[in-house]
Image (cartoon, coloured by chain):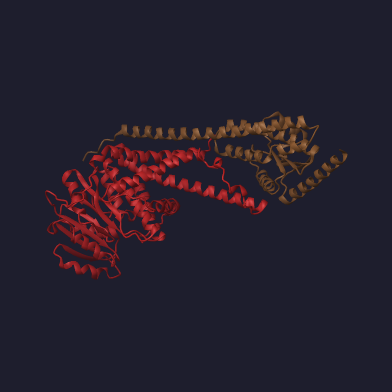
Amino acid sequence: MASISTIIFNIFIFLSVYVQVFFLITFFENRKQIIIRDDKTKLLFYPEVTVIVPCWNEETTIERTVNSLLELNYPQDKLKILVIDDGSTDNTWSKIQSFEKHANVRVFHKENGGKHTALNLGLEHTTTPFVGCLDADSVADSESLARIMSYFESKPETMAVAPSIIVSNTKNFIQKAQRVEYYMSVYIKKMLGFMGAIHVTPGPLTVFRKKVFDDLGPYHHAHNTEDMEIAYRMQINHYQIDQANDAYIYTNTPATVKKLHKQRVRWIYGFINNTIDYRNVILKKKYGNFSIFTLPTGILAIFASSFLFGKALYAFGEFIYKKITEINTVGIQIPDHLAKIDPFFINTQSFLLFVTILLYSLVILSIILGRKMFKGKWEFSLDLLYFFIIYSVIAPFWLLSAVYNTAVSKKPSWR
Amino acid sequence: MNPEPIDWKKYLIVFLFTLGLFATASFVSNYFSNKKVDQLKSIQDKIAIDILSSETQFTLLSELSCKNVSESSVLSGELGELGRKLEWGQQNLGKSEEVTYLRKYYSLLQIKDYLLMKKISTRCGGKSAFILYFYTTAENCSECEKEGLVLSTLRDKYPELRVYSFDYSTDLSAVKAMLDIYKIEDTKLPALVIDEDVFTGFHPIEEVETKIKESFKLQEKNSIETENKE
């Protein structure tokens, strides 16, 4: 009889495959609606947009970020840029001040109070019908804003549009692994967009109708993931969020395992705690796919990864124990039958193997589809390998850290 | 703003699709599993024929020369290899009934090989040592696992050593007869029979090695005596 652990394992794999198949079917249903533009985007009407750039100790990147906004293919008289220094302790403030010469840029300095306070200060000074936020570590592609705005133009009921976030400057394999992950995110976001189930409106240039904040209130602290909480709030109020797959925002990603770990602990901690805060909306059909699909999928991911990690750890422990027993009993042996490996002993028949291959194939497919949703070509590269290594070996640690932090109520820091 | 209605049909379709994928995976895995069981069966059949042939040859030629018999007898290496595959099969194939059946058959082949080789060895001499090894899989027996490691190591070291291993819980009268003969009790497993002496519990590698070395000499001595008599 199958052990309980095998049954749980199979249920988790089944649900994970289910989620991937759901995305794939959504893709086939909607693939004709996915547009990838490569030329200058023209709008019938250019509404006024405010972009808030909150920053805290970003002296190295802030200029590039603001310059990318000034170079947008969008009438500068329709674009207002609010750069807000949230009590930086480095040279950020002096760098920001140099932008005051531009008519459409306003700069603010305030005491450090967290990203949401900087954003809310920006919102207070926003008078335009559209407002976006651009993280100071990201750079907007010149076409990004126009393409984002085209979604509002074609669908008046759209209340927010998120861009495709692309990893720039990959210097090492940790960043290359993230690049692959971001491809997959583009695909997943787009599919969630079709399902009306996006759960995060990321800091790198999501544009909202100002009405969202007028109706639902400003940003909250939200466990340092204010960009997730506002999406939750929008979803439960049935405010539509779309994703513009061909609006590119280039972002810097953590270059070390330690920094990546910190970022992900913050994200997952945010997901767990926002979901706990909004637990009453889980599996309620009146909140749509967001409540029936997105939130349960996120919860499943946390449970399944923790379980798989535990299982892998147990198997590893068992292997080590066996090896130690073997060495204690008969000393170190060089097995001579390893020299000629009998194909009989290769596990070509295991059900587990086939479902795992199935799941990995679906994940690879989602990466390829994500990559194809923006300009350029998909090429097989070692990045894919880095992705699988990093995310299967290290991801469980940040996941468990986030769960642990939630359990002991320890709040993760930004950096 | 109105919520978009949930497309329950899609949830169902995705479920059926996923179920289909799982069924396919299960079918493919089953197919390969069966292939492996067939592979085991064919190896076993080959060995059965070899043993039967050796037995027949031995009966035919026993009055004449020992030379032909010992050269053509089944090599225990093959039998040992089959044992390893069966054990692996039981852990990995998930075809417990079929593999259990094959293991029963394997036990029988081992007994036949043991009896035959003993006869050949007594009559014709040759450097052979036999160990009968009784263990259990019915309960968690860590000492059995350790003893198993000791025996595989020794078998690698001494190619002439023939280890016949029997699962205490095998439901086969021939195996039960062996258990009766050597008075093996399930509370005293693992148990080794070396030269008709029964050793119960775990015995470290050095101890077993000393014993088989004695056993080698004993048999060499016996065979010299037999030759002298002839």
Q: Is residue A280 left or right of residue B182?
A: left
Residue A298 drawn above or below residue A259: above
Q: Position of residue B90 (x, y in %)?
A: 59, 37
Q: Is residue A262 visible?
A: no
Quadrant of the image occupied by residue B87: top right
Q: Is residue B136 left or right of residue A38?
A: right
Label total for image: 0
Q: Position of residue B84 (x, y in %)?
A: 62, 40
Q: Position of residue A107 (x, y in %)?
A: 20, 65
Quadrant of the image occupied by residue B13: top left
Q: Is residue A170 visible?
A: yes
Indicate the chain coloured brown by its letter: B
Residue B6 drawn above or below residue A252: above
Pick the residue in front: A334 or A170. A334
Q: Is residue B32 left or right of residue A234?
A: right
Q: Measuring 39% from the left and 40% from the top, which residue is drawn there?
A: A17
Q: Colour of chain A?
A: red
Q: Measuring 59% from the left and 32% from the top, which residue is drawn there?
A: B42
For the N terminus of chain A, which image quadrant?
top right
Q: Is residue A142 left or right of residue B69?
A: left
